[in-house]
Image (tube, helix red, strand yellow):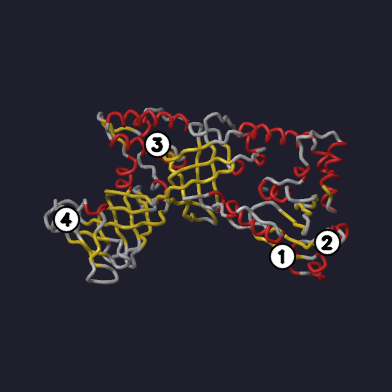
Amino acid sequence: MSNAVPELESANDVNAPVPIPEFVSRFLRTGDDVQRLPGDGTAILIRPAQRSGRFRELLHARIGRVFRPKRYADSSDWFVKAEIDGSTELRSLIVSADGLKRYFYAGSTEGGQATFYSSIGVSETASLAELRLAWRMKSVSTSLSGDARLKNQAERAFNILAHPDIRTNYDTCLQDADAMLPFPYGGCGECVVTGRLSDDGATFFADSILAFKPRMQSKQVKVLLRQCEFLPDRVTLLDTRRKMEIWLDGGLLNGIVWDSTWNRWKQWLRSRLEVKATFVASSKYRFAKGEWTVAKWWAALPSRISVAIPQSINEDIARAQAIHELLGQHADILNRLREQIVRQPVEVSVVQSWLDGLGVSPQFRPEYTTWQPDYEEYFFAELRKRAKTWYLFRDEYLFVLPDVVVSEIPRAGHASYIFAAPKDLESFLRLYGTASRSDIRQNRANVAAELGFIGRVVRGRKRKRWLAEVLRHIGDKANHLDAVEDSEGVSK
């Protein structure tokens, strides 16, 4: 085998050679015919030297969306189709079932074939926490022995079994050898495959995968517990805005014992978990209107996750459970209070006096009367601590500050409405109670002018930029470090 790295011509300058990545060059031999396919130069077709017998053709390509496996017409055989990125002629990669299974799903031991369960030493009924413990023990033993191959195989097995959908498909395949298996985690990345190019040059039919390098990013994210779903064996975050999916199990959440009933009162949780993870570009499938669609997401690799749990989490859990119980105990009273608040703005001291008079627990704060599950404490708290007083009205909170009045719906995606300080607050509140936000935006019947509407601050991804903009209208200043916080607590 030649040690020289072959070179290709640049897409922009035929006299400027471009080296083939090491990812590909290790499969080449002297005399192989190397062609760069039309496009951005990432798709490379290699034909072996004559009579080499190694493969028919070899392709290096970057793949994007990978679709669900499908069966050939009138056949029990199946395949997986992927879209090729960066090529103007080669559009699709078709991977055979055998090629996919051999590369991603075949486990082996010295004694012969093994399942992923036996490769990390657990039963097929193992929980996610049990899988993680077994994988960690296997990683330690293989690290001590210096067997990198077994260590990598154990990590692959764990990442397959820790993904709930892939595990379901894998379990089915253990019972039925003809069952279809997906391309793990959606398959976005670079691959080297062998097979043949179609006559029209638009499709490559792969019978074997030699290498696959997924597209990955390391990220540190803040996970709000109230945005998670609590399942029997895991806590799942599906962040539709950031297109991000994370699974957390008991092995990561030490000291936290949950069950599915937490979903009833999770909206009262305030705690955020600090999660460091390696995310792989993946595909999420959705069945709608009689057909499957696929969208690009980021999935945290289960083997590459670490979690920092706040010290106050147990207090937060107890507080959230207590609020939920109080809401149930005083449901009738709260409904009567809400009927009043829907009709007109009510000052917080009045609401508190109602709660005290009805014997509601002091743990129950006035804002809980109209608090919604997706409200964020941050937006409410920053305005409350600066306000002289505040009012509850409909699903809003009206904060009276020295120079302005701010109408706030403390949820992501909404805007803060800012008004000049009125000469007569009671008159302002009466008029505000007759108008909607739409009326104010469009100044119907001159209501915006009469209310002294200054403008609104739309919330984006960066919460503390929202704060800095609101304080600018108020005439106050935000701490510089507060104003430059990463969007939603995410860093790369």
How many C-alpha atoms fall within 10 Å of the one at disc 3: few (<14), some, or many (≥20)? many
Which numbered circle lies on residue 37? none
Mark 3 vs mark 2, CA separation in Å: 63 Å
- Element type at mark 4: loop
Circle number at residue 4:
4
Above or below for 232 versus 437: above
Mark number displayed over residue 455 = 1
Q: Amino acid at mark 2?
A: Pro
Distance of label 1 from label 4 (alpha carbons): 65 Å
In the picture of the structure, the residue carrying the numbered disc 2 is: 422
User: Which residue type carries mark 4?
Assistant: Ala
Q: Quadrant of residue 28?
A: bottom left
303 left or right of 311? left
Image position of 438 (left or right of 5): right
Q: Are marks 3 and 4 in contact (CB under 8 Å)?
A: no
Q: Looking at the picture, which amino acid does disc 1 mark?
A: Gly
With respect to residue 35, does 261 lie above or below? above
- The answer to whether the residue labelled 3 contacts the one labelled 2, judged by CB atoms less than 8 Å apart, is no
For the residues carrying marks 1 and 4, which lies nearer the camera in this image?
A: 1
Judged by depth in the image, the label closer to the viewer, 2 or 1, is 2
The disc placed on residue 158 is 3
How many angstroms separate mark 2 from mark 1 (CA)? 15 Å
**Mark 2 or mark 4, which is nearer to you?**
2
Q: What element does badge 3 sit on?
A: helix
The residue nearer to you, when weighing 179 against 358, is: 358
Between discs 3 and 2, the one toward the N terminus: 3
Q: Is residue 318 above or below residue 398?
A: above
Other residues around mark 4 within 10 Å, as few (<14) / some (14–19) / many (≥20):
few
Q: Earlier in the sequence, mark 3 or mark 4?
A: 4
The amino acid marked with disc number 3 is Phe
Q: Earlier in the sequence, mark 1 or mark 4?
A: 4
